[in-house]
Image (cartoon, helix red, strand yellow):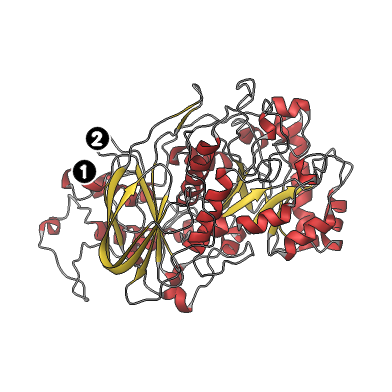
């Protein structure tokens, strides 16, 4: 939302429609479509044609669906100097996938073995990791997921619940390491609170004042420096295309250029500059390219479930403003090939969703720029799904909008985007996210800085993670495997089906489906449902197959190699949720 809300601003909140956009890196589409890596399982579409980037577990070995090399021209490198390396990597990938060359008689020869005795056509993690992913290799890890989650706050809104509730205590309890905030509507900010946030190890994405503010860029940077605030990034102006000024684009281009130059000169190169946020799809074309290290999107779904296609659409839109952004979905990488978020920022390949979320104002009226509401139970389910979906599809950080309900008016949508009620009591979404972050962390501390995706790039980080294959489920069954630095793995599993009908304002039933996780070794398994509890509901020891029920609420399975040390004690440092009521 605009950081200076007015009645006009509130009326103009636009819900982004559920766009379907099929463009995806060809290399990525083939890699995911054939299922070459056991570490990333995407929604299966057993009874219908799978969109790019998805596959059915039952169809991965189907020779009839395998393309030939004539169908798969080599991708073009963004830097011509890299083309030879890219062509080589592409050929290696096709070899590993067993993609046949119709002009090569040797394609019918018997399979040969690698030096280690494995089959030639068996996918190898290192080869999959070598697949180019735009400007950087994105690494998916459990620690990286924790680092990808932030939350929006408004500590300067002293006339709202932020002036009454202990925001810092809530942030510590939630377990996030990143917040998004800026000045208040009167160009003021509680410096003491901002400093306390930083002292808690929480980094701040500072949203700059717009070009017409009396609080200039220079004054804001002076405040940050003199207050010694833990600002890890500075974001361009917020949603200025939604304020009715026909000359907004030119003003923002000038503002962003000045902001970038002065942030680098004042705060240094380690502080990333995030592109300005925009509301309307066509605004990206109108604004054009502006100086920025990180692309920016506000992927509101209007009460609907987040989809991979929608995330892809947002990526392609941000490319118009930040052309260097990596618009491919992440690839799993070996430990020695991991790339820090700092490196991604330096190359301009990172993407932040600086606002996303769902409001629970049940008496509000959708339309005329107001998003439909969801129930509090649906908010919890949808928010966890959205964060996981964003992370596995290439969004480096997602800031949930927002921490706290700003007011009590149930007819006002803008008052009820919070994870916490205005009186400070948690909604189900707060408890669910707290539990999810706690389970993901295990006993491993996550960096409080925005500069790394994982806690380590050596030592324990080199431990081999278990290979995991997901079997069963249905076309909506979605999963992602997130290795931990200690060699354990976290599997997130859910049914990507609508849990809420925004038009009818009612809950939808989502069937539970049985899934088996096939492991390439033995492991101890603990099963959590963060929406319901921080405690493990099931535990299995020394198994190479884990049977679990997949439901709309993400289920988290922690796998610790049987000869390793468990990374959790059975209970995460979270909270039990009340048994969910009907949404």
Residue shown at 77%/54% (left/top)? 261
Relative depth, front residue between 79 and 193:
193
Q: How far across and down, in percent of the image, does residue 105 sit?
A: 12, 56
Q: Vertical placement of 467 versus 383: above or below?
A: below
* Residue depth check, mark 1 versus mark 2: number of the one nearer the observer: 2
Image quadrant in which you'd find residue 270: bottom right
Task: Kindly identify which residue carries mark 1.
Answer: 65
Q: Is residue 129 left or right of residue 504?
A: left
SS for callout 2: loop
**Numbered mark located on residue 255 in the image:** none
Q: How far across and down, in percent of the image, does residue 359 sit?
A: 61, 34
For the N terminus, the quadrant is top right
Separation (CA) of disc 1 from disc 2: 14 Å
**Numbered mark located on residue 47 in the image:** 2
Query: Disc 1 vs disc 2: Cβ atoms closer than 8 Å?
Result: no
Q: Is residue 21 left or right of residue 349?
A: left
Badge 2 density bin: few <14, some 14–19, many ≥20, Cα 10 Å: few
Q: How far across and down, in percent of the image, does residue 564 sit?
A: 37, 76
Relative depth, front residue between 14 and 410:
410
| Residue 247 in view here | yes
Residue placed furthest toward the front: 578
Q: Vertical placement of 476 versus 501: above or below?
A: below
């Amino acid at each position: 939302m605009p950081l200076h809300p007015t009645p006009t601003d509130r009326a103009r909140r636009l819900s982004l429609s559920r766009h379907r956009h099929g463009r995806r890196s060809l290399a990525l589409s083939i890699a995911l479509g054939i299922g070459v890596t056991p570490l990333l399982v995407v929604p299966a579409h057993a009874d219908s044609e799978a969109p790019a980037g998805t596959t059915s577990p039952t169809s991965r070995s189907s020779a009839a669906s395998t393309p030939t090399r004539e169908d798969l021209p080599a991708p073009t490198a963004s830097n011509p100097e890299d083309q030879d390396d890219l062509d080589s990597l592409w050929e290696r990938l096709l070899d590993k996938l067993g993609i046949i060359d119709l002009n090569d008689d040797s394609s019918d020869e018997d399979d040969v073995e690698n030096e280690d005795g494995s089959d030639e056509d068996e996918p190898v993690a290192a080869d999959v990791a070598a697949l180019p992913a735009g400007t950087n290799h994105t690494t998916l890890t459990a620690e990286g997921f924790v680092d990808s989650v932030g939350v929006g706050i408004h500590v300067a809104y002293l006339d709202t619940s932020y002036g009454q509730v202990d925001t810092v205590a809530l942030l510590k309890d939630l377990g996030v390491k990143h917040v998004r905030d800026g000045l208040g509507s009167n160009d003021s900010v509680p410096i003491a609170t901002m400093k306390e946030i930083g002292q808690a190890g929480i980094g701040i994405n500072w949203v700059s004042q717009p070009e017409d503010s009396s609080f200039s860029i220079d004054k804001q940077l002076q405040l940050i420096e003199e207050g010694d605030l833990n600002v890890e990034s500075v974001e361009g102006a917020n949603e200025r295309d939604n304020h009715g000024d026909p000359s907004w684009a030119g003003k923002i281009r000038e503002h962003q250029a000045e902001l970038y130059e002065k942030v680098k000169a004042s705060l240094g190169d380690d502080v990333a500059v995030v592109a300005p946020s925009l509301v309307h799809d066509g605004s990206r074309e109108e604004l054009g390219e502006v100086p920025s290290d990180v692309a920016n999107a506000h992927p509101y779904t209007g009460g609907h479930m987040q989809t991979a296609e929608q995330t892809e659409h947002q990526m392609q839109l941000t490319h118009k403003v930040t052309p260097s952004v990596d618009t491919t979905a992440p690839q799993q990488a070996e430990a020695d090939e991991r790339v820090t978020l700092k490196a991604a920022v330096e190359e301009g390949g990172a993407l932040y969703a600086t606002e996303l979320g769902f409001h629970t104002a049940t008496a509000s009226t959708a339309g005329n720029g107001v998003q439909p509401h969801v129930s509090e139970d649906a908010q919890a389910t949808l928010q966890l799904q959205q964060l996981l979906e964003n992370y596995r599809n290439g969004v480096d950080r997602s800031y949930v909008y927002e921490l706290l309900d700003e007011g009590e008016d149930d007819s006002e949508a803008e008052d009820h985007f919070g994870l916490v009620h205005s009186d400070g009591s948690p909604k189900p979404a707060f408890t669910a996210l707290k539990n999810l972050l706690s389970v993901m962390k295990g006993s491993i501390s996550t960096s409080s800085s925005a500069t790394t995706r994982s806690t380590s790039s050596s030592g324990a980080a080199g431990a081999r993670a278990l290979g995991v294959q997901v079997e069963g489920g249905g076309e909506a069954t979605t999963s992602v495997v997130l290795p931990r630095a200690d060699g354990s793995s976290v599997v997130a599993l859910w049914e990507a089906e609508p849990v809420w009908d925004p038009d009818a304002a009612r809950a939808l039933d989502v069937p539970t489906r049985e899934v088996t996780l096939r492991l390439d070794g033995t492991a101890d398994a603990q099963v959590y449902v963060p929406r319901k509890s921080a405690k493990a509901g099931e535990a299995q020891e020394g198994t190479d197959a884990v049977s679990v029920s997949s439901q709309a609420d993400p289920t988290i399975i922690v796998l610790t190699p049987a000869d390793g040390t468990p990374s959790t004690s059975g209970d995460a440092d979270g909270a039990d949720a009340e048994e969910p009521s009907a949404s």
